[in-house]
Image (cartoon, grey):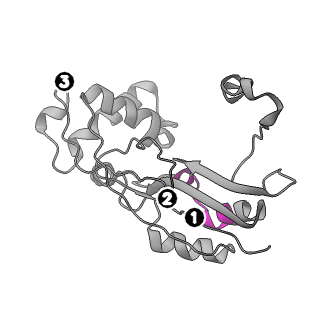
Amino acid sequence: EQARRRLDRFGDRVGYVLADLRGPLPIEAPVDAILSTATFHWIRDHDALFRNLADVLRPGGALTAQCGGAGNIERVSAALRELGADPVGSKRYAAPEESEVRLARAGFTDIECWLHPEPTPFETVEALETYLATIILGDRLEAMSPDEARAFVHRVPSGCPGSRSTMCGSTSAPDVAEPHTSRSWASWDPRPFPGMCPGTTILPTAVPARGR
């Protein structure tokens, strides 16, 4: 509904589909291009994801995507390991080589993937903890009570390697080194993905599909 409101001025030139990327997409006519930002790392099964995208992309069409890649949120992952928690959760931060293999297996050609660093600082511990709770740790907090969730989130920043001791329980800005994001292959230049602690982003780009 938000998309409809924002794009209402384009009328019937825009179509809307609500779908689960883990399954076949309910799109009948093949599309010329697929553009995605900050999405693919939320899906564990990238083989299924790329197959589903290839199935709705015309031969010679292009896929351009920006998402979390290998090394993304690495300092947070280290802190979670220290706390005995699963550092990955339901996400997949793939390396470029992994994605190249999976894209080729799904029928894509002319594949180019890379990692791109771009620091993203948080001005206060409160801002960092809000981001952790809403984006990074959401799937880990579901089984906790509100009090348990707040306490858990509060413990994570102090466990990030290289963090200041003042990060926990103060209003000092945390040290955040090298969160990463990526830029598009062409003229499209997405806003930086809000990475957390040193992270990386992988970009499958300019990927025409073979006839399927």
Do residues under tags 3 and 2 come within 8 Å of each other at their CB atoms? no
Q: Please name the amino acid that badge 2 sits on.
A: Trp
Task: Please tell me which residue lies in front, 122 or 108.
Answer: 108
Between discs 3 and 1, the one toward the N terminus? 3
Residue marked by disc 3: 171
- Does residue 137 appear in this view? no
Q: In the visual, does 137 lie left or right of 99?
A: left
Do residues under tags 1 and 2 come within 8 Å of each other at their CB atoms? yes
Q: Position of residue 146 (x, y in %)?
A: 44, 25
Q: Secondary structure at mark 1?
A: loop
Q: CA distance from mark 3 to mark 1?
A: 43 Å
Residue marked by disc 1: 206
Between discs 3 and 2, the one toward the N terminus? 3
Q: Position of residue 36 (x, y in %)?
A: 59, 50
- Does residue 31 appear in this view? yes
Q: Position of residue 162 (x, y in %)?
A: 15, 49
Q: Secondary structure at mark 2?
A: loop
Q: Which quadrant is the C terminus positioned in?
A: bottom right
Above or below, 8 against 79 in this view is above
Q: Which residue shows up at 41% across the image and 34% down it?
A: 133
Above or below, 100 against 153 in this view is below
Residue marked by disc 2: 185
Q: Which quadrant is the N terminus positioned in?
A: top right
Q: Please name the amino acid that badge 1 sits on.
A: Ala
